[in-house]
Amino acid sequence: MIIKGGYFMKVLHVDLTECKTHVEEVDEEFALKYIGGRGWGARLVWENMKEDTDPLSPENIIVIAPGPLSGLYLPSSGKTSFCSISPTTGIYGDSNIGGMFGVELRQAGFDAVVIKGKAPELSYLWIDDDDIQLKSAEKYAGMGSIETEHLLREDIGDETVKVASIGPAGEKLARMACITADWGRNAGRTGMGAVLGSKNLKAIAIRGTKDLPVADLPRLTLASNKAYKKLSRHNLFEFWQRQGLMSVIDYANTAGIIPTHNFKDTHFEEAEKINGDVMELEYKIGDTACFGCPMACGNVNLVKDGKYAGTVIEGPEYETAAMFGSNVGISDFSAILRANYLCDEYGIDTITAGSLISVMIEAYEKDLVTLEELDGMALTWGDDESIMEMIRKIAFREGVGDTLAEGAYGVIKRWPQLAPIINHVKGLDQSAYDARVAMTMALGYATSDIGAHHARAWPIAKELEMGANWDLNDKADLVIYHQTVRPLFDMLGVCRLPWIELGFDENTYAEFYSATVGIEFTLEELLKLSNDVYNLTRAINIRLGLVRSDDRPPDRVFNDPIKTGPHAGKVLNRDEFREILDIYYQRRGWDIDGIPTDETLKASDLEDAIEYMVQRKAK
Amino acid sequence: MRKKLTVIPERCSGCRVCELVCSISHAGVNNPKKANIRVISLYPHPVIKMPIVCEQCKKPKCRDACPTDAIVVTDGVVTILEDRCVSCHACVGACPIGAIFVHEDIETPFKCDMCSGKPKCAAACPKKAILYVPEHTLGQAHRLASALQYANMQEVEYYEHGVKKKLRYAEIETGGTRGDYK
């Protein structure tokens, strides 16, 4: 064995159809090549998939993978990835979760769990160290995520058990259903909750007690002591603890990139009513952090009076506050908290739900849908009560909610006239940063391997800082750099926020990983492995039928100039986008159709993908 | 001057860095379940996160409960003598705050030893929720709360650089408002 730590070298396989589990010993080459988290997940999805795997069929697998650094003494080591073929997009999907869930899984002695099949009845998986049981969850049917978590703990009889669960939306296979753990930490995107729902798996409860293996603990401790000290001395550290990602509202509004009225505009007049200061001064009752994280970006908020009094929720962070604030025209922070609570409890992604609801408001405004089609709800901007009702309808698939629960593709199928106003890429609704002001952001959304999400690339701040006029080659390189660094965090099982928000040196992660596994790695070597995984997820998507024309930002980016704010009149040029996409493909080593070339796949040790790419090219 | 560990649950974010540094320095492994301190997180009714750590009672109930006199107080630190301990766990149940821990890999129960006067948890806590303070300052927070509660607190809202802020001040009243003045 050359690996001396970081891994238990064990994957737990659960076949729900057969009600069987077995533990697989992982080989070293696999462990090191794919690192963990999203890397392991992508590889396992690749090995299991077929060209026609239906995301909601028992054949699809879902991989739950923390990383080799998850649970260790180093900043923000609480991340876990959920990887599968996405019911939202039909291509590769992953979403990660903070909190404590993955740490507990690792303490139970597993590096990952792979779930396939479909349980005969609604069930939950109970991992108590080596004791693994599949138990009936009929009792929790239809229950919200937060309530499920609470009751499961009570029934197991241990308040410290960690739980990930789905709400009614997941059970009803809403394609934007999320997985919730630690009372409101969500693997929100790409519909991972619907995958669990399709498997009749309501929840996973874990309790683990094992030592996490570390090759050189004194070396890791030394590096981490320095890291924590460095972060705590950053001039924004305390502000970050106070407001977390809510501070982005002011930044995004001032910078003119905040989604407003379904991305029609990028500047919200009433932003100061929904910003971090309002949260901190009027609603915040406590801080929450993920495992090992000094930054504590989570905020617990309570509505103390008004019609939503009593609503208590961890959140919102920026995306939720923007998607259920400016983007639907809500300027009452307590209503945003209520929407956040409902989404968490029902188990739906706040970004997709906020986006699709804003689409319906705009559609009604423009007479693109009838009042009957909206079940008689005359939707208007800022109408919080109708918006809450829409959230409920999506979760329970009632009336118009049944269509919205099918995601962007489902909405377009029923109402093709709405295609130009739905801001999505590959079926995944765009997150809360407008792309019209930055070609890099548009390219990042367009080429993200899971659809329009900022997790892969968030170059918008850099482009705004530098001004838009710089070389397209450099812009493409910036996007590729982001798409290489950011997923690396998801592979290691740590959070990227210390790096992106508090300027933490990414080279430190090579030191953490080297000390943990007992093998020397440089950041460049790790980035190469991350890039290889990007080629792998591309290969998965090509196998699933992705073509060049899918790599395009939402139409609004080209067609609909920004109306107000610092970027009024701004819109992106379609020809320029084509040009940068060509450059991007070429720099990635993909052909003109976006298919990785043989040389690229060989350089990424993905020889087994070549034959599939050849098949696609033939079509 | 004798110092004590004290916690301020309202500040705690539940990040468990205290458990990590404790388990590494005491058990020599990265395992929060082997730490001498634990964070309990409750949600949503009530929302509270609280590090649980030995308060080094001067008349410890754990010592009283120990059938083999394995628990002694040395220089203000309550210590379990492993060679005398029979691991009956009577102390675990006797501790009023649950600050004595058990793990199947470890033969005897374990608890905080205050790191020989330099507690690592207090030094590492990113939220300053664990404090290492002179013993005579214990209760200060409650004394402060008492004073604030006694005073008739008023709130005034104002703007500073465009940011809304709140200032609290005491309205001075004539005579006392507490029953014992009347």
Image (tube, coloured by chain):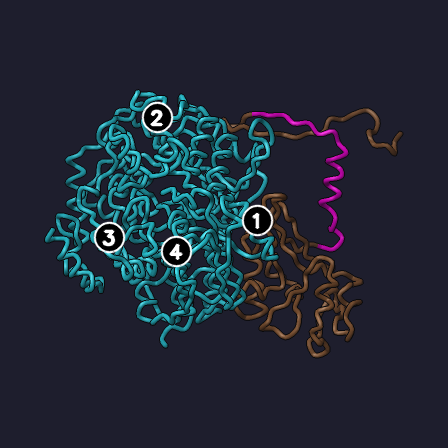
* Mark 2 or 1, closer to the camera: 2
Q: Amino acid at mark 2?
A: Glu
Instruction: Point out the tag, 3 or 1, that comes first from the N-terminus.
Output: 3
Q: Where is mark 1, residue-wise?
A: A150
Q: Is residue A162 above or below residue A452?
A: below
Between the residue at mark 4 and the residue at mark 3, the CA separation in whole angstroms equals 18 Å
Decide which of tag 2 and tag 4 comes sooner along the chain: 4
Task: Name the outermost residue toward the right.
Answer: B182
- Up/down of A549 relative to B137, above or below: above
Q: Are marks 3 and 1 in contact (CB under 8 Å)?
A: no
Q: CA distance from mark 3 to mark 1?
A: 38 Å
Mark 4 — residue? A118
**Residue A228: image tag:** none
Report the chain holding disc 1. A
Q: Quadrant of residue A65?
A: bottom left
Pointer 3 and pointer 2 on the same chain? yes
Q: Residues within 10 Å of mark 4 (few under 14, many from 20)?
A: many
In the image, the segment drawn in magenta is: B134-158
Residue on which disc 2 sits: A373
- Dot 2 crowding, Cα within 10 Å, few <14, some 14–19, many 20+: few
Q: Are marks 4 and 3 on the same chain?
A: yes
Q: Earlier in the sequence, mark 2 or mark 1?
A: 1
The amino acid on which the numbered mark 4 sits, given as a three-letter code, is: Lys
Q: CA distance from mark 1 to mark 4?
A: 25 Å
